[in-house]
Amino acid sequence: MTSNALKSVAPVAVTSVISIPSAKAVSNSELQARKNAATPRGVGVMCDFYADRALNAELWDVEGRRYIDFAAGIAVLNTGHRHPKLLEAISTQMERFTHTAYQIVPYASYVELAERINAITPGEHAKKTALFSTGAEAVENAIKIARASTGRAAVIAFSGAFHGRTMMGMALTGKVAPYKLGFGPFPGEVYHAPFPTALHGVSTDDALAAVNGLFKSDVDPKRVAAIIIEPVQGEGGFYAAPVDFMRGLRKICDEHGILLIADEVQTGFARTGKLFAMEHYDVLPDLMTMAKSLAGGMPLAAVCGRAEVMDAPAPGGLGGTYAGNPLAVASALAVLDVIAEENLVTRGARLGSALKDFLIGLGAKTPAIGEVRGLGAMVAVEFVQPGTDKPDAEFAKRVQSNALKNGLLLLTCGSYGNVIRFLFPLTIPDTVMDEALVILEKAILDAHIAKA
């Protein structure tokens, strides 16, 4: 059923690795009780089982159950769990040193990674890159850099956006529950405009008019430092910004001296069929944030931007104790090698195209599928009440639950929680992908039968 759709995708070899013995025998229920007693409920956890080991697109819990991982640590594992080249790079670095704090004693690998990011990001202009630890930290620093460069304070973001759980990250995020509940007040001078989503009746013209409307009703454009946008919204539902919308934002920014920040934390590193999602557009951002799959599971983030903009903060204004950790940097350099050597940009595009065709085919079997969309392997299916565009979050949750019972990890997203997003490692073997799609089809059709 699925193999024909995927046969054109060259398989990725899984290199043998030394097996690791299971952790000390313990049950999921015992760990769940300990977790509930020891950790706060604010750290929401999807699964009630506990990881023991993983390889490529598969993981096993402490009781030995196997799962196919279509979550990938929330888009962190484009190169899969425990890729041998990443393990080797990290191990080699551990033999040399694990930490100096780059601001105290620098090291060559940080410089090398910055050079490579400058070279592979869109645009031929002079760029500079600073390294950090998390996506939220990258976003915070991008705002700092934009404010230092422009001498302005205000920032415009979009409905449905997700930019992190720090205070500025929450202020920029365009979704209240669960991210903002009980945490305000948030930093000021942050404004939101609607993100264009044709399925829900928001056109490019509507969204651009709303941005310009802010200049009439809320903030002088001469006070706006930056507009920040995810080229494809992550938590917001995998909606891709239309090309004419991105062009319109670039025009607005150029007209008013505003910087355009592309948040590529979730879209970066071959996920969208390009190395970066901004390569799908014919405009360039002034700053880009990245993290997640940059280091294949190690905590690392980056801000890359125009050299003159990046140089605006004074010495000491950027950094962090763990920013650019040498183990994470070593892993990131290996990630870039793996993406190139295994041609993961092309492979991701082909896997994503096959998945979309598969989901569109399922649409003939259930009217709950309102839309299938995605760039490259950043694919989503949105569930709606049949015959309408009204979100059906219950159906999405039922699909997720059905899949999990049969060993497939799926993530929901969207402002209404009615979207399933697919974030499988781009290194997933064809046989495992085929197996996952069999489980996915059953999960969707069983949800349809239960609803009927």
Image: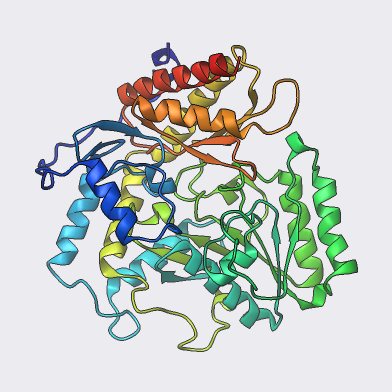
- For the N terminus, the quadrant is top left
Task: Where is residue 290? Give x, y as percent.
Answer: 48, 59
Question: Which residue in the rendered view is the most extreme toward the right?
Answer: 216
Above or below 197: residue 316: below
The answer to whether any part of residue 129 appears in the image is yes
Count of numbered circles on the image: 0
Of residues 325 and 363, the one nearer the viewer is: 363
Judged left or right of residue 68, residue 289 is right
- The structure residue drawn at horizontal position 55% and vertical position 62%, both measured from the top left corner, is 288
Up the image or down, 402 lies above or below 137; here it is above
Residue 73: x %, y % from top left: 38, 47
Which residue is at a point 38% across and 43% down the rendered structure image? 72
Write down the quadrant of residue 406 in the picture: top left
Q: Residue 217: where, in percent of width, then height? A: 89, 68
Q: Residue at x 58, y 68 (%)?
A: 183
Would you say 343 lies left or right of 60 here?
right
User: In the figure, residue 408 lies in which quadrant?
Assistant: top left
Whole-percent x, y for residue 444 in the image:
51, 21
Q: Is residue 148 above or below residue 254?
A: below
Examine the rendering and report whether any part of residue 306 can be seen.
Answer: no
Classify residue 308 as left or right of residue 443: right
Q: Is residue 70 above or below residue 108?
A: above
Q: Residue furthest bottom?
A: 315
Which one is in front, 372 or 448? 448
- Image quadrant in which the C terminus is located: top right
What colouring style does the render use?
rainbow
Q: Nearer the viewer, residue 193 or 357?
A: 193
